[in-house]
Amino acid sequence: MDICGLSETHWKGKGHFTTAEHRIFVSGSDNASQNGVAIVVNKRMVQYVDSYQTISDRIIKVTIRTKPTNMHLIQVYMPTTDADDKQVEDIYQEIEQLVSATPKKEPLVILGDFNSKVGKSADNNNLQNIIGMYGLGDRNARGERLIQFAIDNNLAITNTMFKQHPRRLSTWTSPDQKTKNQIDYILISGRWRLSVTNVKTRPGMVCGSDHKILVAKFHRKLQAVKLIKTKRYSVPTKEEIMKTMKSVKMPTLKNDVQEMWNDTRTWINEIVKGSCTSGNIKLKSKTWMSNNTINLLEKRRNLVISTTFDKEHKLRNINKEIKNSCRQDKNKHVHEICTELERHSATNESRELFNKVKYLSREFQLRTQIIQDENGRKITDPDGIAEVWRKYCTTLYEDGESSNNINRPNQFEHEPEILKSEVEHALNRLKKK
């Protein structure tokens, strides 16, 4: 999966962070751990991310560079049905502001948990370009509001337009496994509706939620980005460097400083290339999970797709086992680090000791890539941020004398001309000496 939208993450703060396989763009509450949305991008797709906007703890937008135009993704988390209607209307207004700011010729995808049921369109209905024939359930009031929003902005609700088995249409299942509804949707601009080839849920994928993974396939070309490939080198020992220095001819002294510097730089590069092992070195990532925990996760995945009678009871038990096993593995991992701390302290290895303490005491912080221009608008794309900094530095170091029409006195005043009497006085003093 290249891009994944998340709702109700309960993550605080706004920004992004990177894992071993993904970059996650987060928009949550600044104070309370509630609501929260995020968009997860696979590491091979990160280079195509143009910018992102953190609107609120219920809305986030990410722009992807594609051909011939950019593609805009908006992740939404709507309040539940017992929430106030005014709160729902305020969120729809924020989404419509984003939609109106998006160029009409560029594809727009709105996805997330809308907590509404739209049902399906009738044969004689004029909404067939908005809702397909394969919706699930009966339409409710929130579904009517979502349909009106789709009509006003020319959006198609894609997961109602593909014929699937009912278990691949439902996106939410009640805790007792008896009620199934379709309340998560993927909307796309009407003119780009045919670029969606299939939309369905994945009941067998375990996501630790009562919602199912809703997957859509798009046909869209990505805009190529030129990347500078860097090589990793292994750090050589002192003996390897000395051995290479003996085999490389040292530069001779020259009168031209620039030529001498070029020869010295070439000499240093040859020593580095000769003593280091070139090539891409893959770094192994360490995990604190044990094989027992991984086996339990695999066992839970097989149990989810099974059809056993007491499936719900077994799932509850295995979830408890997974939590206990993860807790034990984490404690064991911390205990091993503390043992290493004692060893580093006993052998006076201050650098390793400091790094381990920093690792244990660190706090999670989101990275932000947002800046405000002189008009107060939030800029997230790299080119826009660079332009804001260019204008700021230009204004900061600008000479104000050319722009200010202030009559300033001359900076240098000419002294009066030397008199003939002053010259004669100076000559007379020389004669007396």
Image (tube, helix red, strand yellow):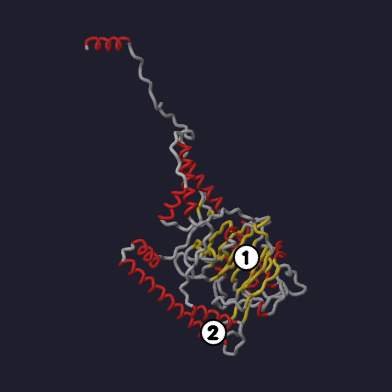
Residue 27: give x, y in percent of width and height. 52, 64
SS for tag 2? helix
Among all residues in the image, which is located at the extreme right?
124
What is the quadrant of the C terminus in the image?
A: top left
Residue designated by label 2: 315
Q: Amino acid at mark 2?
A: Leu
**Which residue sits at x=44%, y=55%?**
240
Work out whether residue 333 or residue 429 is closer to the camera in this orientation and state it: 333
Q: Amino acid at mark 1?
A: Ile
Judged left or right of residue 235, residue 8 is right
**Which residue sits at x=38%, y=23%?**
413
Which label is found at residue 110?
1
The image shows a total of numbered marks equal to: 2
Residue 333: give x, y in percent of width and height. 41, 73
SS for tag 1? strand
Judged left or right of residue 203, residue 263 is left
Closer mark to the observer between disc 1 and disc 2: 2
Among all residues in the image, which is located at the extreme left?
432
User: Looking at the picture, does residue 332 appear above or below residue 193?
Assistant: below
